[in-house]
Amino acid sequence: LAKTTQPISMDSYEGQEVNITCSHNNIATNDYITWYQQFPSQGPRFIIQGYKTKVTNEVASLFIPADRKSSTLSLPRVSLSDTAVYYCLVKGSARQLTFGSGTQLTVLP
Amino acid sequence: DAGVIQSPRHEVTEMGQEVTLRCKPISGHNSLFWYRQTMMRGLELLIYFNNNVPIDDSGMPEDRFSAKMPNASFSTLKIQPSEPRDSAVYFCASNLGDSSYEQYFGPGTRLTVT
């Protein structure tokens, strides 16, 4: 399995930009890096995915360096409703899909 | 579309009993995934199907677990016999089956084995 590392938790205030990084070695060279959001008692929800450099959609940006050993999810201006657990998802070089351990983001008023 | 449908939402059973979890993927989706989530081990992929064929079952814990997908609109995950350590939330997810990992998750089944 690919080994991933995410911070266990992060706190932020409303309106701030939040960056969550996932370190992932030994991942497949030709597959997406994907991020999910999960609220309590719900299934994970897709946020964004990318292969390299930078991807942006209406809710987040994803930065992936050239070596693809990490990725950073950027939430531009967080609100209280962004309080959730955020997971990276990668595919290992042996082709297994692996979720990160998750980062609990708490947005404070 | 109603999204991915899972049943039951909650299941409480005694050790040794057979448990069957059910999933209906989103219509038109070609891939289906079964995950297990626990506090200790996080989200783990158990098995996934593409066009009803199991592609990777390396995450299935042991022979007590089995999964089937008899058609494009239905899948089951069976545990026989169940053990307390199987207690977890089991999620089913589906997607179009292309190279994307944009998966749509169901609400999950919370399984408690006593």
Image (cartoon, coloured by chain):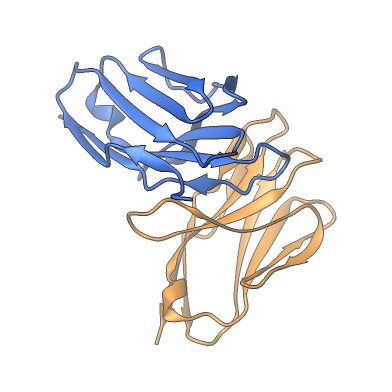
Chain colours: A orange, B blue
Is A59 positioned to the left or the right of B98 in the image?
Answer: left
* Residue located at (26% from left, 23% from top): B19
* Residue located at (36% from left, 30% from top): B22
| Residue A108, image quadrant | bottom left
* Residue B32 placement (x, y as % from top left): 54, 33
| Residue A16, image quadrant | bottom right
Name above or below for residue B108 compared with residue A79.
above
* Residue B47 placement (x, y as % from top left): 52, 27
Is B87 positioned to the left or the right of A100 in the image?
Answer: left
Most foreground residue, B6 or A101: B6
Is A40 positioned to the left or the right of A98 in the image?
Answer: left
Looking at the image, which residue sits at the far top?
A: B63
Name above or below for residue B80 compared with residue A16.
above
* Residue B82 placement (x, y as % from top left): 25, 20
Is B17 positioned to the left or the right of A86 in the image?
Answer: left
* Residue located at (71% from left, 55% from top): A70
Name above or below for residue A83 compared with residue B64.
below
Quadrant where the C terminus of chain B is found in the figure: top left
Q: How many marks?
A: 0
Name above or below for residue B72 compared with residue A79.
above
* Residue A17 placement (x, y as % from top left): 60, 80
Most foreground residue, A45 or A32: A45
